[in-house]
Image (spheres, rainbow, N blue to C red):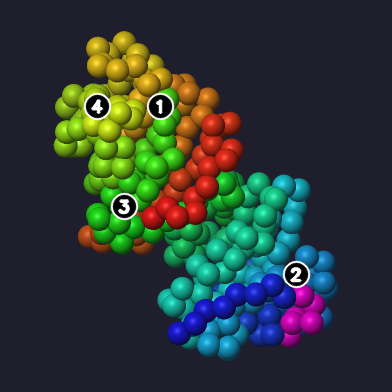
Amino acid sequence: MTVEVKPVGADEAATVHAVVHAAFEARPPLDPPAAALTETPEQLEERLAVHGGLLARVDGTPAGALVLDPVGSSMYLRRFGVVPDQQGHGVAAALVDAAVEAAEGFDDLTVVARQELPATIRFWERQGFREIRRDPPNVELRRPLRTAVFRAPDADSMRGLGRSLAGQLGPGDLIVLTGSLGAGKTTFTQGVGAGLGVRGAVTSPTFVIARVHPSEVDGPALVHADAYRLGGVGELDDLDLDTSLDRAVTVVEWGEGLAEGLSESRLEVHIVRGDGDDDSEERRVEITPVGPRWHALSFRGLG
C-alpha cells in the first residue's frame, strides 16, 4: 500500500469534496452538525482557490484531504478527513506530515476539533498538538512547527533516538524531559549517555537527585537530574557536583516549569505513550528547540 500526498487547488474541488463529505458523514451525529456536511463543491472550490489544500491517495485512490487556511502566523487545517475504509492505514499521519511541509514559514499548525469526539482529539495530541482554547463545542489545538515528532516503537528505538541527538550536543546544553511515570525518560537519557561516551550506567536519578557521568572520550560530562524532588532546578547549582553545568550536557527529568531558568536555550523533550496504552511499548517523542542555541539544529537523520 502506497500513500501519496500532493498539494491541490480549485481544479480538484470535486474530489476533495467527495473525500471530506464521506469522512464527516461517517462520524457520529453532532449538534450543531459539522459545517463540512452542508458545504457544496462550489463553496469548497472557492476555499481551495485561495490557499489550496492537500489530497492523499492510497494506490492512486483518493483517501484523505484537508484545506489550508492561513490566519496570521498560524496555518489552520480545515476539512481534515479520511474516508472510512482507509482509516487506520497512516493516511491521517501522512496528511499531517505533508501539512508541516506546506506550512513552511508559519509558526504553527492549528486545528479545531469537536469536544464530542474525544478519539479525534487524542489523534491530534498524538501528532504533537496541544489544546490552547475551548469554546464549546469546539476545541482548538496547536502544534509549533519547530517541534519534531518521532515514533519510538520500543526501548531500543528510544535509546537510538537519544544516541542520535547526542551527536548535536555540546558543553552547556540543557534537555528538559517530561513524560508520565515509565514513559521512557531514563531510557532516552541512556541513549544520550551512550552517544556522549560517558562512564557509568545511566539509571533513574530519583533517589540521588543528580548524578554526574564523566566522559570517557574527552567530551562533556552528562549531568542527569531529577527535578521532582527539587524546590527549583536552580538548586542544582548548590549541589556538590563533580562538574560545572556549563561544561556538561544536563538532562533534567520532570523539569517542565522548573528547569527553564537554567539556560535561555534548551531542548524540551516530551514523551507520550503510544495511543495512551499503558501496555504498549510504543512512544511518541516530541522535541522542541527553544532559544538561540538551536537556530541551526537539524532533525534530519535523528531516530
Depth check: give the residue in front, 74 or 118.
74
Disc with the residue nearer the chain's start (3 vs 1): 3
Distance in Å between CA atoms under marks 4 and 1:
12 Å
Which residue corresponds to mark 1?
Answer: 171
Q: How many marks?
A: 4
CA neighbours of label 1 inside 10 A, class few (<14), some (14 to 19), many (20+): some
Q: Nearer the viewer, residue 107 or 163?
A: 163
User: What residue do we see at 61% from left, 69% from top?
Assistant: 80
Q: Where is residue 242 shown, x and y percent of the image?
A: 25, 16
**Three-letter code, disc 1:** Pro
Q: Which quadrant of the structure image shows residue 218?
A: top left
Residue drawn 40% across the image and 26% down it: 171
Residue identified by numbered label 2: 52
Q: Nearer the viewer, mark 2 or mark 4?
A: 4
Q: Marks 2 and 3, how far apart in space?
A: 38 Å
Q: Main secondary structure of the magenta part?
A: helix
Q: Is residue 214 magenta?
A: no
Q: Gap between marks 2 and 1, in whole Å?
A: 45 Å
Q: Earlier in the sequence, mark 2 or mark 4?
A: 2
> First in sequence: mark 3 or mark 4?
3
**Residue type (three-letter) at the residue carrying disc 3:** Gly
The residue mark sitting in front, 3 or 1, is 1
Quadrant of the drawing holding the N terminus: bottom left
Residue that mark 3 sits on:
160
Q: Amino acid at mark 2?
A: Gly
Q: Quadrant of residue 281?
A: bottom left
Secondary structure, mark 4, is loop
The part of the chain drawn in magenta is: 9-14
Residue 8 picture location, percent across and down: 72, 75
Check if mark 3's residue and mark 4's residue have beta carbons within 8 Å.
Answer: no
Q: Secondary structure at mark 2?
A: loop
Q: Is label 2 or label 3 in front?
A: 3
